[in-house]
């Protein structure tokens, strides 16, 4: 086997621990050399359960990490408001970058980061993992093959089982940048381009969310120049379990449906009615395969075996949609793009 790619994992919050850390460790072509995390005690205690040769350092030692020639790429899993800083530092050090979604906090900084990556000829990948889910990928392929002809409307539901802790919500960027951003990505991937108008409404049912001037329930409506209408129903807490569903209706009457939330599709019909397994309890359990597949794609793109499928234009469009949804929520008016 060829030499492994050295990796530095920057940020060691929940998603880094339960997803990226494990997928990097398990990948035969990746070698995790550093974890950069301000809470070094927490990170060290976690890491040593798996390997004792991974070096844990605070962010103040980042430059030492980036100067290590054995590091080929960084995985950035910090709060969004720190992404730009770490992306630019990594690119300036000649490292390829895998960055959690969204790439940055706004359109301008997103464009700047991609311009820098292009200038240096380095891979910059944004982790919109749902594209790599087998069911979602199948939807995209069938749309591309013309199975439903013109998309008339897309309806999505995205609900998490449990409200995230307030400390997480503080740095999440809000419901549109943190949660609905995935639906913005998929709408653009399926339809192409930007909608002509965005309208958003929302409400904060939880006091801790109100204190952050955010909402935990939102509805977004977007109309595209083609006439296609997208509706996104998002909620940060649904006690019955994780619920992610999508329906795509085409001009030829064909409707494609995708339902996520259950470990299997088996349903039991009997005297007790219709029974099925409980829904997944958390986001990662539902999308685990897609997280693994996106790492595989990153490695292929790093080695020149595939083209980065999440483009600069798409990420810039997503930043525009996040901003438009926030503006619409604040003003109560539709925002034209």
Image (tube, helix red, strand yellow):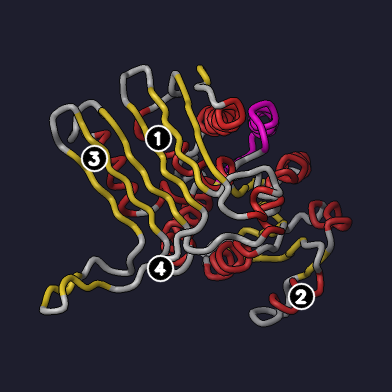
For label 2, the SS is: helix
Residue highlighted by disc 2 = 44
In the foreground, 180 or 308: 180
Left-right relation of 146 to 279: left
Q: Residues within 10 Å of mark 2 (few under 14, many from 20)?
A: some
Left-right relation of 158 to 213: left
For label 1, the SS is: helix
Residue highlighted by disc 4 = 280
Q: Residues within 10 Å of mark 4 (few under 14, many from 20)?
A: many
The count of marks equals 4
Q: Nearer the viewer, mark 4 or mark 3?
A: 4
Residue highlighted by disc 3 = 142
Q: Does the magenta-highlighted stretch encompass residue 118?
A: yes
Residue highlighted by disc 1 = 187
Q: Quadrant of residue 156?
A: top left
The answer to whether 261 is drawn above or below residue 114 in the figure is below
State yes or no: discs 2 and 4 in contact (Cβ < 8 Å). no
For label 3, the SS is: helix
State yes or no: discs 1 and 2 in contact (Cβ < 8 Å). no
In percent of width and height, residue 328 lies at 55, 27
Q: CA distance from mark 4 to mark 3?
A: 27 Å
Report if residue 286 is visible in the image: yes
| Region of the chain picked out in magenta, as a range | 105-126
In percent of width and height, residue 124 lies at 61, 40
In the foreground, 203 or 276: 203
């Amino acid at each position: 086997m060829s030499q492994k790619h050295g990796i530095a994992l920057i940020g060691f919050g929940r998603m880094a621990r339960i997803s990226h850390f494990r997928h990097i460790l398990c990948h035969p072509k990746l070698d995790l050399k550093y974890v950069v995390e301000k809470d070094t005690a927490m990170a060290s205690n976690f890491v040593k359960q798996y390997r004792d040769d991974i070096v844990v350092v605070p962010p103040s030692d980042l430059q030492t990490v980036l100067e290590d020639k054995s590091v080929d790429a960084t995985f950035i899993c910090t709060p969004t408001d720190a992404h730009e800083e770490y992306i630019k530092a990594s690119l300036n050090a000649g490292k390829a970058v895998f960055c959690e979604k969204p790439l940055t906090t706004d359109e301008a900084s997103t464009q700047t980061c991609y311009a820098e990556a292009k200038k240096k000829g380095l891979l910059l990948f944004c982790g919109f993992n749902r594209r790599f889910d087998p069911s979602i990928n199948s939807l995209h392929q069938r749309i591309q093959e013309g199975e439903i002809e013109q998309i008339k409307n897309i309806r999505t539901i995205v609900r998490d089982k449990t409200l995230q802790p307030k400390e997480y919500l503080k740095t999440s960027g809000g419901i549109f940048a943190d949660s609905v951003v995935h639906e913005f990505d998929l709408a653009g991937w399926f339809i192409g381009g930007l909608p002509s108008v965005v309208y958003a409404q929302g409400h904060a049912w939880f006091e801790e969310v109100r204190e952050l001037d955010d909402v935990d329930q939102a509805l977004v409506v977007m109309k595209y120049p083609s006439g296609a209408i997208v509706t996104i129903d998002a909620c940060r807490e649904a006690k019955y379990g994780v619920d992610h569903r999508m329906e795509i209706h085409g001009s030829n009457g064909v409707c494609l449906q995708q339902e996520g939330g259950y470990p299997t599709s088996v349903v039991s019909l009997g005297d007790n009615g219709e029974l099925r397994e409980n829904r997944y309890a958390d986001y990662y359990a539902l999308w685990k395969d897609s997280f693994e597949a996106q790492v595989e794609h990153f490695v292929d793109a790093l080695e020149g075996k595939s083209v980065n499928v999440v483009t600069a234009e798409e990420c810039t469009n997503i930043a525009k949609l996040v901003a438009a949804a926030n503006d619409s929520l604040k003003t109560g008016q539709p925002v034209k793009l």
